[in-house]
Structure formats: structure tokens, C-alpha cells
Amino acid sequence: MTDMPDTDARIERLPLLDAILSRLRDMIIEGQLPPGTRLNEGQIGQQLGVSRTPLREAIKYLASEGLVELVPSRGAVVKQFGAREVRDMLEVIRILEQQAGIIACTQATDAGIAEVRALHDQMLDCYARRDRMAYYKLNQAIHTAIVALADNGALCEVHARLQTRLKRIRFIGHEGADKWAGAVAEHEQMILALEAREAEGLSEILGRHLTLAWDRVRAEFDAPS
Amino acid sequence: MTDMPDTDARIERLPLLDAILSRLRDMIIEGQLPPGTRLNEGQIGQQLGVSRTPLREAIKYLASEGLVELVPSRGAVVKQFGAREVRDMLEVIRILEQQAGIIACTQATDAGIAEVRALHDQMLDCYARRDRMAYYKLNQAIHTAIVALADNGALCEVHARLQTRLKRIRFIGHEGADKWAGAVAEHEQMILALEAREAEGLSEILGRHLTLAWDRVRAEFDAPS
DNA sequence: ATCAATAATTCTGTATACAGAACACAAAAC
DNA sequence: GTTTTGTGTTCTGTATACAGAATTATTGAT
């Protein structure tokens, strides 16, 4: 396992604020608070069992994280991303992953690469079992792990932040069996290129993988359910 | 002028929170609150003329922004970056600027490029007058503007965030006349490549420029004043 | 005089209180 | 019937209050 606790790594943590942040992020990602929803401080505070003060602090934190938008006199609403914004974010992710991959090919440790391979194998298992949820999480973990191989804290952080914003959207994952198989094949190629430390090839595949991810997401926007 | 208000662009703004954020950021960047300083909520609140509640919310926002670190039962301290972290951030900035430059070469408008040229010319003026402060600000503005040419909101945002974190460090700007002249020459090349829309050349120069920036900063770390 | 233990103070973390803006609903005017 | 206006409610924004942890000062012992 990589020691990259999602969005930020600190030694000690603030119990309450951290708990509220996790809960809120989950509520947003899982769709319990759909995009556009005003989050009512009274209600949510009661629901989480905390007063408004620490809750508001958490909301400000999430606002800076980009999951939530602050609108004057009206509190915070769950940020809604348009097709354009999603495309932009995926493009930045692509840039980051490609460069991370290139760096990883030259300076990752064999052990680090082996860890990614292990995640990949686990993911294949999930694919075999058609366990979408577990597959999805391992998928994210693999991309995070590849970025982590570049051993650049800022890179990991920025990547994680963008990934968090997109979780809600990619979580949908309605792709059909064929697309899914395609994605798995791409991942297979990724791992092979990484193990062979072929920077060019890895970068190319990562780029294609992300481009296809965008295609899949775009379909959601063109034909909104 | 590019319409890129530093870190985030919203239509309406929250008066107080926004004011506090600006003030705090300034205090940190200008060194009024040096790295490692605990920010005392009572004192700062009194100094800014606001109560602790909105101040704390602003601090949480800055924590998510990475300017400040939250330590349990001890409030927030101004984040101190080590050589490694600075190098990592500069590397990510390099990656982002290089890609932005490549994209800009193919899809920027002539008007957009002209704006960057205008900033550059202004900067040359400042250099002629040896106005370090104005030079520094235009320097940042130019890099921001080049990134903006890629017309990717997420890219701008991520770049701006990293740039903000580094402001405090790059602000020092102790470089001697020779290095300064070198930086100006690099900028000249950048603009020429951009105007010629030579993606490869622009990317190469941007990369070198950022690498040299790191060399300059590294000197600060090797020989801390 | 130095250090340890303890007391006093400060500061953070959380809850609550209050004022004003936004919102919802109902009644009146057109 | 539709729009407008007025009123009551809800919710946000900010200040304040209070409990507990951390820090500092003080006192006693070696």
C-alpha cells in the first residue's frame, strides 16, 4: 500500500474537523448531496451531531478544495461541473500522469513497481468477478500509485485533489462490457510498459487511457440521464 | 490584462471572508508572519477587527490551500517548506507551464499572445529601471498569462495555487545582476518562441527557465541567511 | 543557582446567541 | 388568473461564552 492518505498527509490530525471533512466528502461523492444542493448548516450539523461552527470550518476547507462553492448569503452549494470543466480537469490529470509515468520509469524502485503490479492483479480479480465497486477503487489506487512512483509530493497532492473532484463523476461508471474490457486491456499495457520501464510507451498509453476516460464521461454529458 | 484573479474566480464574493483571506495571504507572503509562526487567533482577529469565528474559517481555507498547517490543540502555523518540497513544486510548475506553452502555441489567439507581449515589454521597462518589485509582479503575471493561453481552467487554478505557495520564497529575489540579466534574456526567448508559435522551442525554454529558478532558490537553502 | 513540580494564564476547540438577509407563503391588486 | 406585495419563517454571517488543553510563570527542592 502506498502511504498517501487521499488528499493530504499530516502527522497528527484534528479529530472533529477531519471526521466532518470525511463525512461531507463521502456524502458528496456518493451522491447523497447531489451537485447544486445547498448544504443546510442546521440540518447537516444535526445529522452529524456537531454544532455549526466546526461544520462551517469544514465547509470552508472543502470550498478551497473545490468540492463546494461559496455563494454569498446563501451558504455553500455542492459544486456542479460542466462538460468543459471535466474535460479540463481530465486533461490536467493526463498531463500529470504522463509526466509521473515518465519519471517513474527512470527512478522508481523495483519494489514500488511491484506494488503497482500487485494492485493491478487484484484489479483483474475484481474484473473477473465483475465487482465494479472494488474495481473502481483499485483503478483509482493504481493511478495514484503510479503518480506516487515519481516521488514528488506536490505532484501527488495536485493529482489527488483533481481526482477527488472527479470521483463523483467517474463513480457513475456505466460503461458497457466492451468498454470495460478495453479499459482493462489498457491497464495491462500500462503495467507492462512500467515494468519494462519504457517511458515513451507508458506515457502514450496513459494519455490514451485518460482520453478514453473522457470519451466515456462525455457520453454522460451528451445524453444526460 | 488577463481576468485571472490570482487563485479563484467567482462571480460574487464573500465580503468578510475574502478580505480576511487576502490580508492573511499578504501577511504570510510579505513575511510579516514568517514560516513556523503560530497564528494567534485572538491577536490577529483583533488586528484585523473581526471576531475569531470568520477568522478561523479563513484559516481553514488557507490550510486547504497549503499556506498554513493545522496542528491539533495548537492552532495553525505558517507552513514552512523544505528544499525538497520547493523543488517538487517547481517541478510541477515546470510540467504545467511546458504543457500550457505547447497548447498555447497551437490554440492561443493572436490577441492573447499580444497581451503577453505587452506584459513582457512592461517588464523590460521595470528591468531598465531596476524596479525589482514591479518586475517581480510582472514576471509572475507573464507566467500566469502564458498558462491562461491554454484556456484550461483547471490548469490555471492548479498553477496559481502552486505559484501562491512559492510567492513567499521567490519574493526574496536576491539574484545578482548577471542572473537577473539571464532571466530577462530567457523571457525574451520565451516571447519570441510564443509569437512564432514554436511549441518545442517554447517548452524547452520554459523548462530551462524553471530549472534555473530552482537553482537560484536552492542557493537560498544551501546558504540560509 | 538549577531544575522540577505546580499554579496561573493564555489560547484553542466547540457551542450558543443574535442580527440581518433570503425565502416561502398568503393575501390583495390588477 | 396572474402578478405583486407584505409578512412570517428559515438560514446565513458574525460575535460571544465556556470548557479543556497548552504554555508560561512561580514556587519549592536539591
Image (cartoon, coloured by chain):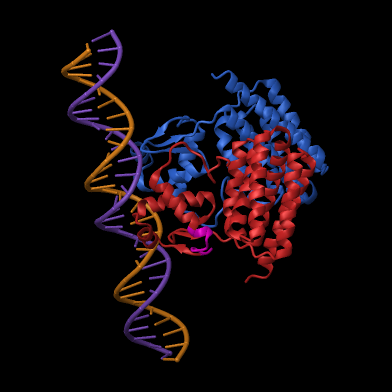
Chain colours: A blue, B red, C orange, D purple
In the rendered image, residue C19, in percent from the top left (x then y), is placed at: 23, 44
Is A141 inside the magenta-drawn segment? no
In the rendered image, residue B31, in percent from the top left (x then y), is placed at: 52, 63
* The C terminus of chain A - image quarter: top right
In the rendered image, residue A202, in percent from the top left (x then y), is placed at: 78, 38
In the rendered image, residue B16, in percent from the top left (x then y), is placed at: 38, 48
Which residue: 58% across, 18% down?
A223
Left or right placement of residue B124 versus residue B56 in this view = right
Please give the count of numbered marks on the rendered protein: 0
Of D9 and B185, nearer the camera is: B185
Q: Relative to A21, is D28 above or below?
A: below
Which residue: 39% across, 53% down?
B55
Is residue A93 in sight in this rendering? no
Which residue: 52% across, 60% down?
B30
Of A135 and B52, nearer the camera is: B52
Q: Quarter of the image holding residue A173? A: top right
Of A10 and B151, nearer the camera is: B151
Q: Relative to B12, is B82 above or below?
A: below
Range of the magenta residues?
A: B27-36
Is B32 inside the magenta-drawn segment? yes
Left or right placement of residue C22 versus residue A140 in this view = left
Is residue A53 in sight in this rendering? yes
Of A1 and B59, nearer the camera is: B59
Magenta stretch, main secondary structure class: loop
Left or right placement of residue B184 versus residue B168 in this view = right
